[in-house]
Amino acid sequence: MTFQITIDGRAVPVEPGQTIGAALHAAGVRAWRTTRFGGRPRGLFCGIGVCFDCLITVNGRPPERACLLEARPGDEVTTS
Amino acid sequence: MSAPDDRVSAACDLVVVGGGPAGVAGALTAALRGLNVVLVDSGARLGGQYFRHQAGAAHTATPGLDRFLRQGRALGERAEVLLGHQVWTVTRDGDRLTVHCQTPDGRPVAIRCRDLLIATGAHDRPLPFPGWDLPGVLTAGGAQALLKGNGVVAGGRVVVGGTGPFLLPVAAGLAGAGAEVLGVFEANGGLALARHPVLALGKAGEAAGYGLAMARHRVPYRTHQAVIAAHGERELEAVTVARLDGDWNVLATREVACDTLAVGYGFVPQIELGVELGCQTRPDADGMPVLAVDGRQRTTVDGVWAAGEPTGVGGRHLAELEGRIAGLAVAGAPVPGVLARRRRRMRAFGEALHHAYPVKPGWQSWLRDDTLVCRCEEVPVARVRAALALGATDARSVKLLARPGMGWCQGRVCGYAVACLAGERPRPPRRPIAQPISLGALADLDTH
Ligand SMILES: Cc1cc2nc3c(=O)[nH]c(=O)nc-3n(C[C@H](O)[C@H](O)[C@H](O)COP(=O)(O)OP(=O)(O)OC[C@H]3O[C@@H](n4cnc5c(N)ncnc54)[C@H](O)[C@@H]3O)c2cc1C
Ligand code: FES
């Protein structure tokens, strides 16, 4: 059954088994962090855990790779 | 020897790292010969890249997936399969190896074994170009992983670019799943492939299938063309497509509006674990370092074997075959001549593909001074060129001076490009750990 996670309070639908990165990308959220120096937006790039572009903060934990992290109902993503 | 919370699987003969076609075939073959086998993969499911699939979904569009899943179930009955376990280093102690993994919740797990099979696959090999770090630009494999693993179509209006036969399944997959694929831009001349005798023998059927799918969805396939720039404010809005000469210098350009780009210029075999253990490497036909193995998939280090992409990119059929050969060899069984011959033929096919789809130096003319080479440390081309002007003569000194490859990905993404810019062949990775891991797990290792 489809469930929800949130990004900065906004609801995003998830199919069971999807990664947080995939669910955000599918919902049209293509960037969730900015780079340290240039402030450039970043989201998915390699999709398989190699590039670390997709680092994301979920439930206040230290940054993890969104393309690998399976979404759980109620996960809260924060972008700043 | 190991930290108290390390789980040590004492009686294991063989640890296989990688649950793709090579690893599963190797593990199952060895288990069927009576070996005590543990297979480790960082992913949530077996499959690797080609057989990546959604949890529980009846998504069997991938040719061969049913058979692979049966192999996976047979393996599960005869061997221990540890999913979600990322191997970050292997240490040696006499004739025993210890494979150190980490679970997603950060728990260290150590497995002792006599033999190790490295079946870690490959990752995409991107080339930098202006705007390649805009959200909406994905690697070709990344777009494929979104689709196969998550059922997510990477975008609505999609451009596919790069070089190699892999662009075909990516485009066919996207179009079949409902994306409007505006074009496949192959920087080389795709037709060279069909004329090659080995290739005519080999994959003609599969290529024809993708060709049909592309024709059905009216996807244009353009050779000697490439995406040389991506444009957009906060995310991708358009790309510049160029017509290229034989060296990939730009002849003419046009803009194509799109929301997504899937781009890939071949693959980088993941050989870190082997390099760290001292295994000899050799340059593959495209110059990429791969693990040197003999006819039984044995590396130059005792007890260490390799199969699939780490021994040279050749696709999933070769990966599975090499896995089987390795499984037999580790179990001390003879390798039938028919398997050895098939392997030689498929290797030749892989090498022919490398020759048909090379990376030509003209891509460097697509770069602008401010184009990022290293996405992690945000190092622009100008800084790399300044380091070269200062006297850096190889990729390693460029890295020390300009810091490309010093970030999170440890040069996995930009390593190839930096080597090209420095005018040398890519070298085997010298990374202390096979996967970046938390400092906690490193500290635990110190206490051993
Ligand atoms: C992103 C991507 C998508 C691809 N999609 C296709 C496709 O759709 N069609 C196609 O024909 N080819 C595809 N390929 C090419 C692919 O390399 C081969 O087809 C085939 O999957 C190779 O099989 P393999 O067994 O050698 O490695 P893989 O299938 O890549 O399997 C390697 C496995 O090792 C695991 N692994 C690696 N390092 C570690 C570690 N340190 N610890 C634990 N586990 C580890 C990985 O998680 C992976 O599951 C893709 C390649 C990439 C990079
Ligand atoms: S997209 Fe590359 S690590 Fe997640």
Image: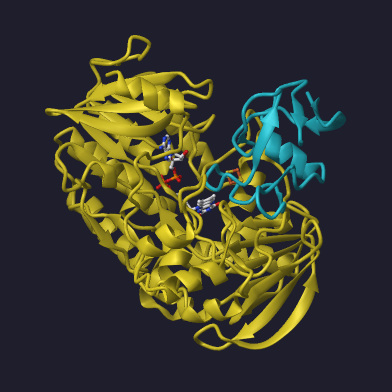
Chain colours: A cyan, B yellow
**Could you tell me which residue is drawn at 46 percent across and 32 percent down?**
B437
**Could you tell me which residue is drawn at 55 percent across and 69 percent down?**
B381
Residue B63 vs residue B192, the one in the foreground: B192
Asked if B134 appears above or below B390 in the picture, the reply is above
Asked if B442 appears above or below B107 in the picture, the reply is below
The quarter in which the N terminus of chain B is drawn is: top left
Q: Position of residue A54 (x, y in %)?
A: 64, 43
Asked if A61 appears above or below B388 in the picture, the reply is above
Q: Residue furthest front?
A: B390
Res B49 seen here: yes
Q: Position of residue B204 (x, y in %)?
A: 48, 68
Number of marks in the image?
0
Is residue B371 shown left or right of residue B237? Answer: left
Q: Position of residue B218 (x, y in %)?
A: 75, 70
Residue B426 vs residue B57, the one in the foreground: B426
Res B190 seen here: no
> Residue B250's quadrant in the figure?
bottom right
**Could you tell me which residue is drawn at 38 percent across and 20 percent down?**
B109
Tell which quarter ligand 2 is in. Answer: top right
Is residue B49 shown left or right of residue B129? Answer: left
> Residue B235's quadrant in the figure?
bottom right
Q: Residue furthest top?
A: B4
Residue B73 vs residue B27, the one in the foreground: B27
Q: Residue furthest right?
A: A10
Is residue B309 shown left or right of residue A32? Answer: left
**Could you tell me which residue is drawn at 83 percent across and 33 percent down?**
A12
Is residue B232 shown left or right of residue A46? Answer: right
Q: Position of residue B147 (x, y in %)?
A: 66, 46
The quarter in which the C terminus of chain B is drawn is: top left
